Image: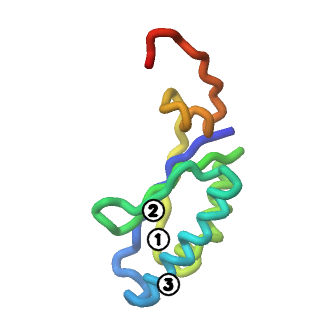
Amino acid sequence: MKYFIIEGTFRNPLPIGKEELTQAIARHIAYLQKGFDEGWILTSGPKAAGGGGVIVMKAKSQEIVESILASDPFTNLGVQNYRIIEFRFHDGQPGVKEWFGVREQLTSGHE
């Protein structure tokens, strides 16, 4: 399995109005829900400064990630460009390790 950080950046200017963007955001969130339900998205959320968001995802290949993003409502509406960054997992909190498929050995002295 490979791991990816996806950075979405809204196009400037946006090709749609504010009302349509609000609807597109709702469809985008519903679209991402499949990834949460199936376990291939760990987390997602908007950038604190606005103008896009971030997704942490796992897939067998970057081509699969590109295919998923190609079906995103934001892509279809021309709202957002995506930058895909593949990374190797090194370490994380226990729940995160489970998502990455790391079996943690218990060590004494760490509460």
What amino acid is found at the position of numbered circle 2 in the picture? Answer: Gly
Q: Secondary structure at mark 3?
A: helix
Secondary structure of the residue carrying numbered label 2: strand
Q: Is residue 62 left or right of residue 45?
A: right
Crowd around label 2: few <14 · some 14–19 · many ≥20 (10 Å): many
Q: Residues within 10 Å of mark 3 (few under 14, many from 20)?
A: few
Name the amino acid, label 1.
Gln
Q: Which residue is disc 3 drawn over? A: 23
Label placed on residue 8: 2
On the image, the x and y values in percent for residue 3 come to: 59, 42
Above or below residue 62? Residue 74 is below
Q: Nearer the viewer, mark 2 or mark 3?
A: 3
Report how far apart the C-alphas of labels 2 and 1 lie in the structure.
Answer: 6 Å
Q: Quadrant of the C terminus?
A: top left
Q: Which mark is residue 80?
A: 1
Looking at the image, which residue is at 67% across and 58% down?
37
Q: Quadrant of residue 54?
A: bottom left
**Residue type, numbered disc 3:** Gln
Is residue 34 shown to the viewer in this render? yes
Q: Which residue corresponds to the image point at 49% horizontal and 31% vertical from the top-left?
A: 92
* 2 and 1 marks in contact (CB < 8 Å): yes
x%, y% of residue 25? 48, 76
Q: Which mark is residue 33?
A: none
The disc, 2 or 3, on the residue closer to the chain's N-terminal end is: 2
2 or 1: tag closer to the N-terminus: 2
Q: Position of residue 88 (x, y in %)?
A: 55, 33
Q: Work out which residue is located at the far left of the displayed protein and give it.
A: 49
Visible residue check, residue 83: no
Q: Position of residue 21 (x, y in %)?
A: 44, 83
